[in-house]
């Protein structure tokens, strides 16, 4: 499965508290269907309340039930070097109950390449502690504990102080007791690993076992979750759902779904539930001993059978209704470490261009382990060719399948590089593997998503030179020893001297800063990182944007992130900005700015900004590192000038908009009712307030209102300012109750008056059929609770609407139910009377026609009459409303939108949703989790190595990798980027295939227009007939001859200023011109790229 997510980006969260909470919020989850679940944690144990503000975006990945199970789980982490601290960071951010760190080893210089909580100071300082007269230095676990603890106040982080050595077999085995999962990220002897694994699999302890290593540019992960591990949701995808068009009276019953809503997405053997089905004599309605789920036999993309369901005796077919896939748990069996080590079996792939690589790496890691066991558990020292050769010899002796004989030069190179760089801890590899392993830990704790079965191997050998380097002896004191050991000092210096622009300081931006600080990016005298982000830090950011703490809330992300990165590496030169990147900030990020850059890295949350940056990197021919996440899915794209296509070369189709008539009168999905509720919120609580304020402050307000909406606008102002203006909170409650009646009762009755339930169209079909669901009025009942979401929508609507109304008018609100009951008993609700002559559009065409007719529907005199009846602004001096802009993270806003949407859904027999799910749909929230973020930033930083030239040779497009991952399945594929498309042109008789990266560059100074035209005639043999700059034509053969003669003597910059009437900014170095030109010999038009003209 490859998920194309170019347009998905990490969303910077917004969240704040609210005094109004849902009266009865129901949590919908996929739960395991067993008495007890994995790790002997009974469902009743996972009852801790979830902090929805902190875990906001993560909950849309894991769900409440899985989150609660994680919050009742304990992990043991053996090894806190680079990979270990990455795993710890990810699982602590995710919110498991506790983490026990075990690593008494003293830090070394290699650790600093991947451990962001260690520094050079830790290599030399002797923090002496008294322990029965013995002195000891702190190990890696103790040095990292406090900073890891700061990541999440809900997670207990402790150190296994009883284990004094990683060779302490008894101590390590004791750690297994009571743990949900044991994770080992440092080399241990094979026998000790097998013993720990066997204890994890023991009958009295269902503990999951993970062993992972990051060695240079190679990595391995092994998972054993026992003989029978229960997975509640194997892929994390939303259950397939469709709308029923009909169910035939046949044996077996045949279901057809509405084709205009897409394929049903089911497979034979899947189980589904039905809801809101009309007809079939109630055969598919719940209750009366009927099955709650039905098995499916697929017969087509829009049809399927229900085996065992005989509908042949039913009096009528079923019409409409909804189907929803039921996700059933699966049990997965794993093999123990000892068995898998001897026979790895089928190995998970990460790069199909290296289909033979996983078995080779399995052999190489066995040889490396064998070497370590005979050298006091130490890997080869960098630069020690003899030691690397010994590993290769061991591999040959273990090579029963003759893997080294298949393309021996390549195979031996891989083994030698693995051995030579095995001590190196590189941040991008730790981030990549840390994301993968972190998610495996969460799977072990939650039982959600499919784990890796057995071994997984990963490498980035494209970053490596042909042979291991010799002059790379570690200093023992430098944080860059790991990088130098693999790539050499010259490559490290290039990293130190880099000048990069990081756009965005959210989750991906934080991870990128961390990686760069450890890699040494911009940590030299010539280097500099520019980072910009307009957003401030909010609480919901803290579960993924790990550089931020509670103390940083409300501070700018770019400033806090820059400060945190500089604390990790004090040599980092970083400049934070709080500016948007776009055309309006080119005074800051202009020609002179980009001219000094080596590349751009995007960590953006929208497509528009990405496309703008894409045009900038095209123009300045800079590499761009792009990545994005969507829950457990992630993608990376590397953009290399003249080698790969640019980001904007391929684009997703635009999202389909909901037709107006569907929103207004014929909704059939909860998405429709939520959009309607959001639109109503904007109109009632924002637009009406803004219109009133504009009327009160702008004497010429009426003249500026659009003619086709002028009547509706002034009527709304009169209602808000005069007819319905509240003076007390009680007035707000009465207003809310009357609005309820209008929206969910009277309007529906009017619709049924226009289109009765039994109405038939001119073609003889029922009007209320297909996607048109016949509505029914909702009768107000303060105690009503909807069946699907179990929410008190009637009460919630009144409370939320009244409080929002009160806030608009500066009136103090309240939420106590007794008060609302008392006030609502006194409200007099007028009886409904159907209006004759009201036109309601039955389809989109009628809706457009009605809109056009409305444009001139009301006389200006009627508008003037209403305006004259309004209080004069002077009479209300100082009065001002508080317009309310919808914010998905404010609970009172979402309470209103959810209740409003659900009530409309009840009108149309659409399944309702709770506030949590409604927030995701209405707010278009992109799910996010720290593990995926870490993984994609790791992958993209590996591409940065290639960009600076670590392979020490010119790379072809095959060496670069775009990545697509889905940690839930799990799935990863790396593939070569797409080459840029070419355009053929013939210049001076020679063919030229140019791409989007090409331009006609002119660096001749600010020459005159006459010299400019002459240059193309002599240099390219072209007759220029038109020159344009943006939307301005500077020269054309049909232009006024006198003006042309004047311009011919002007410099190109003067021509531009003369025509555009705008002065060129002082920091602008280039002008862009588009030409229309013909070949002087053939007189044929030549298609050319733009002209990049440097005038300063």
Image (cartoon, rainbow, N blue to C red):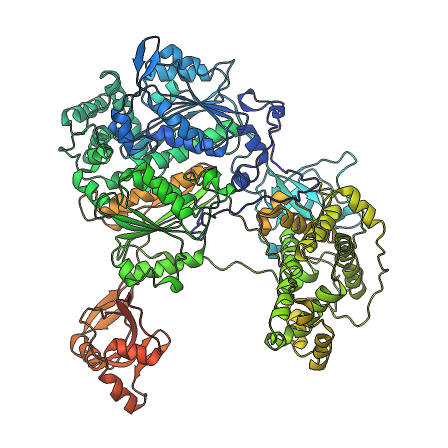
Q: Is residue 716 above or below residue 243?
A: below
Q: Is residue 941 above or below residue 623?
A: above
Q: Residue furthest top?
A: 132
> Would residue 88 be seen by someone viewing this image from the given angle?
no
Total numbered badges shown on the rendered structure: 0
Q: Is residue 260 left or right of residue 113?
A: right
Q: Residue 206, how many percent across, how many down?
A: 51, 19
Q: Is residue 847 above or below residue 639?
A: below
Q: Residue 608, how many percent across, how many down?
A: 44, 59
717 vs 990, nearest the viewer: 717
Q: Residue furthest bottom?
A: 1042
Task: Identify which residue is drawn at 59% across, 42% down.
Answer: 239
Q: Quadrant of the N terminus?
A: top left
Q: Is residue 328 left or right of residue 843?
A: left
Q: Quadrant of the C terminus?
A: bottom left
> Would residue 480 be seen by someone viewing this image from the given angle?
yes
Task: Identify which residue is drawn at 61% across, 43% down.
Answer: 916
Q: Is residue 701 left or right of residue 781?
A: left
Q: Residue 196, how many percent across, how many down?
A: 40, 16
83 vs 579, nearest the viewer: 579
Q: Residue 563, how many percent across, how many down?
A: 36, 42
**Image quadrant assignment for residue 1025:** bottom left
């Amino acid at each position: 499965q490859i998920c194309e997510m170019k347009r998905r980006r990490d969303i910077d969260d917004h969240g704040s508290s609210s005094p109004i909470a849902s009266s009865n919020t129901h949590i919908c989850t996929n739960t395991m269907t067993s008495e007890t679940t994995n790790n002997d944690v009974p469902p009743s144990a996972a009852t801790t309340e979830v902090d929805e503000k902190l875990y906001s975006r993560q909950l849309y990945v894991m769900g409440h039930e899985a989150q609660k199970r994680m919050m009742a789980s304990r992990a043991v982490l053996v090894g806190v070097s680079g990979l270990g601290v990455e795993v710890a960071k990810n699982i602590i951010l995710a919110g498991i109950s506790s983490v026990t760190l075990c690593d008494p080893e003293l830090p070394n210089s290699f650790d600093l390449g991947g451990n962001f909580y260690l520094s050079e100071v830790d290599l030399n300082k002797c923090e002496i502690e008294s322990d029965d007269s013995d002195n000891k230095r702190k190990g890696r676990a103790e040095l990292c504990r406090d900073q890891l603890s700061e990541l999440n106040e809900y997670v207990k982080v402790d150190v296994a102080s009883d284990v004094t050595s990683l060779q302490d077999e008894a101590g390590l085995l004791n750690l297994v007791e009571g743990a949900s999962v044991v994770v080992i990220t440092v080399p241990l002897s094979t026998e000790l690993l097998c013993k720990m694994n066997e204890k994890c699999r023991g009958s009295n302890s269902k503990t999951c076992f993970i062993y992972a290593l990051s060695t240079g540019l190679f990595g391995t992960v092994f998972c054993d979750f026992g003989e029978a591990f229960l997975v509640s949701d194997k892929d994390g995808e939303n259950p397939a759902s469709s709308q029923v068009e009909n169910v035939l009276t046949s044996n077996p019953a045949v279901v057809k779904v509405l084709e205009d809503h897409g394929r049903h997405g089911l497979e034979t053997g899947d189980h589904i539930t039905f809801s809101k089905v009309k007809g079939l004599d109630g055969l598919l309605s719940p209750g009366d001993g009927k099955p709650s789920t039905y098995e499916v036999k697929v017969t087509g993309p829009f049809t399927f059978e229900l085996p065992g369901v005989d509908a042949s005796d039913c009096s009528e077919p079923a019409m409409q209704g909804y189907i929803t896939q039921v996700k059933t748990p699966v049990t997965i069996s794993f093999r123990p470490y000892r068995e898998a080590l001897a026979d790895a079996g089928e190995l998970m792939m990460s790069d199909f261009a290296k289909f033979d690589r996983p078995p080779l790496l399995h052999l190489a890691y066995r040889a490396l382990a064998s070497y370590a066991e005979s050298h006091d558990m130490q890997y080869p020292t960098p630069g020690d060719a003899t030691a690397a050769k010994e590993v290769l010899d061991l591999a040959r002796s273990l090579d029963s399948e003759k893997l080294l004989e298949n393309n021996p030069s390549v195979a031996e190179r891989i083994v030698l590089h693995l051995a030579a760089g095995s001590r190196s801890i590189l941040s991008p590899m730790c981030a990549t593997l840390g994301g993968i392993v972190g998610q495996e830990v969460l799977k072990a704790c939650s039982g959600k998503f499919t784990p890796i079965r057995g071994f997984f191997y990963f490498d980035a050998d494209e970053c490596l030179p042909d042979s291991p380097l010799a002059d790379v002896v570690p200093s023992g004191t430098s944080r860059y020893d790991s990088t130098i050991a693999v790539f050499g000092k010259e490559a490290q210096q290039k990293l130190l001297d880099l000048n990069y622009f990081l756009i965005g300081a959210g989750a991906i931006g934080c991870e990128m800063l961390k990686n760069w600080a450890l890699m040494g990016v911009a940590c030299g005298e010539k280097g500099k990182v520019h980072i910009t982000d307009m957003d401030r830090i909010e609480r919901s950011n803290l579960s993924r944007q790990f550089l931020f703490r509670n103390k940083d809330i409300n501070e700018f992300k770019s400033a806090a992130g820059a400060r945190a990165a500089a604390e990790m590496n004090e040599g980092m030169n970083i400049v934070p900005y709080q500016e948007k990147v776009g055309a309006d900030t080119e005074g800051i990020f202009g020609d002179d700015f980009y001219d000094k850059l080596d590349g751009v890295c995007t960590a953006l949350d929208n497509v528009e900004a990405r496309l703008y940056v894409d045009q900038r990197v095209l123009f300045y021919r800079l590499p761009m590192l792009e990545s994005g996440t969507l829950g457990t899915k992630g993608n990376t794209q590397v953009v290399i000038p003249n080698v790969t296509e640019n980001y904007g070369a391929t684009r997703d189709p635009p999202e389909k908009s909901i037709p107006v008539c569907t929103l207004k009168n014929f909704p059939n999905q909860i998405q429709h009712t939520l959009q309607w509720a959001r639109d109503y919120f904007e109109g009632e609580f924002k637009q009406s307030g803004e219109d009133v304020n504009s009327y009160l402050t702008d004497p010429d307000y009426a003249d500026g209102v659009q003619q086709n909406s002028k009547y509706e606008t002034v009527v709304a102002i009169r209602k808000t300012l005069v007819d319905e203006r509240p003076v007390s909170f009680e007035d707000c409650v009465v207003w809310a109750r009357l609005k309820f009646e209008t929206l969910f009762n009277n309007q529906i009755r009017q619709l049924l008056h226009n289109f009765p339930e039994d109405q038939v169209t001119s073609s003889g079909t029922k009007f209320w059929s297909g996607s048109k669901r016949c509505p029914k009025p909702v009768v107000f009942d303060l105690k009503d609770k909807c069946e699907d979401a179990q929410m008190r929508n009637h009460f919630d609507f009144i409370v939320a609407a009244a409080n929002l109304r009160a806030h608009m008018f500066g009136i103090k609100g309240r939420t106590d139910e007794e008060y609302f009951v008392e006030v609502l008993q006194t409200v007099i609700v007028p009886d409904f009377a159907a209006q004759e002559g009201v036109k309601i559009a039955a389809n989109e065409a009628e809706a457009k026609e009605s809109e056009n007719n409305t444009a001139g529907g009301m006389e200006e005199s009627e508008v003037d009459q209403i305006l004259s009846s309004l209080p004069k602004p002077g009479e209300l001096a100082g009065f001002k409303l508080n317009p309310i802009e919808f914010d998905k993270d404010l609970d009172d806003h979402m309470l209103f939108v959810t209740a409003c949407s659900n009530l409309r859904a009840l009108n149309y027999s659409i399944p309702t949703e709770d506030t949590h799910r409604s927030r995701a749909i209405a707010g278009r929230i992109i799910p996010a989790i720290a593990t995926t973020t870490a993984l994609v930033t790791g992958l993209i930083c590996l591409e940065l190595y290639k960009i600076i030239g670590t392979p020490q040779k010119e790379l072809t497009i095959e060496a670069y990798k775009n990545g697509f991952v889905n940690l839930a399945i799990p799935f990863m594929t790396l593939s070569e980027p797409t080459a840029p498309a070419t355009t053929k042109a013939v210049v001076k008789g020679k063919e030229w295939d140019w791409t989007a990266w090409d331009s006609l560059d002119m660096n001749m100074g600010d020459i005159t227009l006459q010299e400019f035209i002459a240059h193309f005639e002599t240099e390219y043999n072209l007759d220029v007939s038109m020159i344009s700059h943006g939307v301005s034509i500077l020269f054309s053969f049909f232009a006024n001859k006198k003006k042309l003669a004047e311009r011919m003597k002007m410099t190109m910059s003067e021509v531009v200023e003369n025509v555009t009437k705008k002065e060129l900014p002082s920091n602008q170095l280039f002008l862009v011109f588009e030409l229309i030109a013909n070949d002087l010999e053939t007189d044929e038009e030549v298609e050319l790229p733009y002209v990049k003209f440097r005038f300063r």
